[in-house]
Image: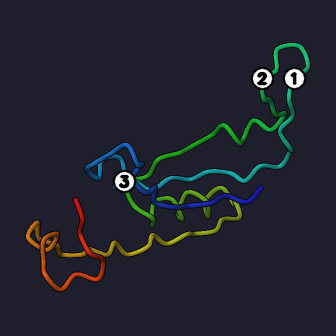
Amino acid sequence: MLARIYKPAKTAMQSGRGNTKEWLLEYDAEAARRIEPVMGWTSSSDMRSQLRLRFESKEDAVQYCQRRKIPYKVVEPQERRLHKKAYADNFRYNRAQTWTH
């Protein structure tokens, strides 16, 4: 029952950084998922895999795990790299890739 504490990345459908400020605590799966033969749904007997707790800070999530004696693993978020670009760079003469119509 190892818990994973991480800060979620923004989804591909978002242009902003909404829902990425909180830290999440999720449990690793203990039981494998299986396909139910009658309906074809994916199911699992592990109820903790459905649990997802939100915290305002990493320290709050770590304290929660320590109080409840839950083994945990903290996954640090990757630094966001910004590439400064200008629209005029698309029409630059010395581009690496030639632009054609």
The answer to which of marks 3 and 2 sits earlier in the sequence is 3
Q: Nearer the viewer, residue 11 or 100?
A: 100
Q: Residue furthest right?
A: 37
Residue count near mark 2 (Cα–Cα under 10 Å), binned few <14, some 14–19, many ≥20:
few
The quadrant of the rendering that contains the N terminus is: bottom right
Q: Residue at x 45, y 69 (%)?
A: 77
Three-letter amino acid code at the position of disc 2: Trp
Q: Nearer the viewer, residue 80 or 68?
A: 80
The answer to which of marks 3 and 1 sits earlier in the sequence is 3
Specify whether 47 is left or right of 81.
right
Look at the numbered discs 2 and 1 and tell me whether their residues touch, using CB distance below 8 Å: yes
Q: Spatial distance from mark 3 to mark 2, Cα to Cα?
A: 30 Å
Q: Is 39 placed above or below 86 here?
A: above
Specify whether 101 is left or right of 59.
left
The answer to which of marks 2 and 1 sits earlier in the sequence is 1
Q: Residue at x 12, y 78 (%)?
A: 92
Q: In the rendered structure, find residue 88 and report the number of the disc placed on it.
A: none
Which residue was labeled with disc 2?
41
Q: Which callout, 3 or 1, points to the residue nearer the camera? A: 1
Which residue was labeled with disc 3?
20
Could you say whether the residue bearing mark 3 is in a helix, strand or loop?
loop
Q: Residue at x 33, y 45 (%)?
A: 14
Q: Position of residue 60 (x, y in %)?
A: 45, 60
Which residue was labeled with disc 1?
36
Q: Which callout, 3 or 2, points to the residue nearer the camera? A: 2
Q: Residue furthest front?
A: 101
